[in-house]
Amino acid sequence: MCTRLKYRAEADVFNDSVTELYDFAIEEFTEPEKPMKADEARLHLEAAENFVDIAQVKAEGREENLRWAIEAYKKALGYFTIEKSKSEFARIQNNLGNAYGSLSEVRDKEKNLQRAVNAFQEALKIYTLNDFPVQYAATKANLGKRSWVREK
């Protein structure tokens, strides 16, 4: 039990640190009115992945962390478009689908499951069986899981 409390306390500190660093970095590196740069997009992507990681281990604040992850993924997609970086676009869409799927377990089940399905379908525009067989299979599995949950 003592180890569990210590782990939760460390997760709280990590959560606060990621949030503060993300806010600071966005404030320092974002230039309003200018197109997003690759470094800024990667910052959004890293933050999104950190927020998802935190949501997986910390029940308190799970919804909030998933929402931050989703927003950061969406911002990263402002740079990593299907035209500019197909594989990165597909990877982000798959991760976005997983984040929406996790959020559906906490709030607005139907709406977030539909968003998850939409994101997976976007990823599958790039992740084809011939070009990306492993990613195709993983994304199809994610799509199948969320579609099955939706039908239940």
Image (tube, grey):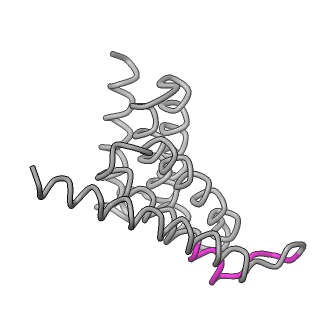
Q: Is residue 147 left or right of residue 138?
A: right
Judge by depth and name the residue closer to the eye, 131 or 105: 105
- Which residue is painted at 63% across and 83% down in the image? 39
- The x and y percentages for residue 25 are 64, 78
- Which residue is painted at 55% across and 47% down in the image? 67
The correct choice, above or below, for 43 with respect to 105 in the image is below
Residue 105: quadrant of the picture:
top left
Is 144 part of what is drawn in magenta? no
- The x and y percentages for residue 37 are 71, 81
Where are the magenta residues, as a range?
34-43
- Which residue is painted at 43% across and 62% down in the image? 15
- The x and y percentages for residue 94 are 45, 53
- Which residue is painted at 45% across and 32% down in the image? 104
Tell me how many marks there are.
0
Judge by depth and name the residue closer to the eye, 10 or 122: 10
The correct choice, above or below, for 129 with respect to 113 in the image is below
Residue 52: quadrant of the picture:
bottom left
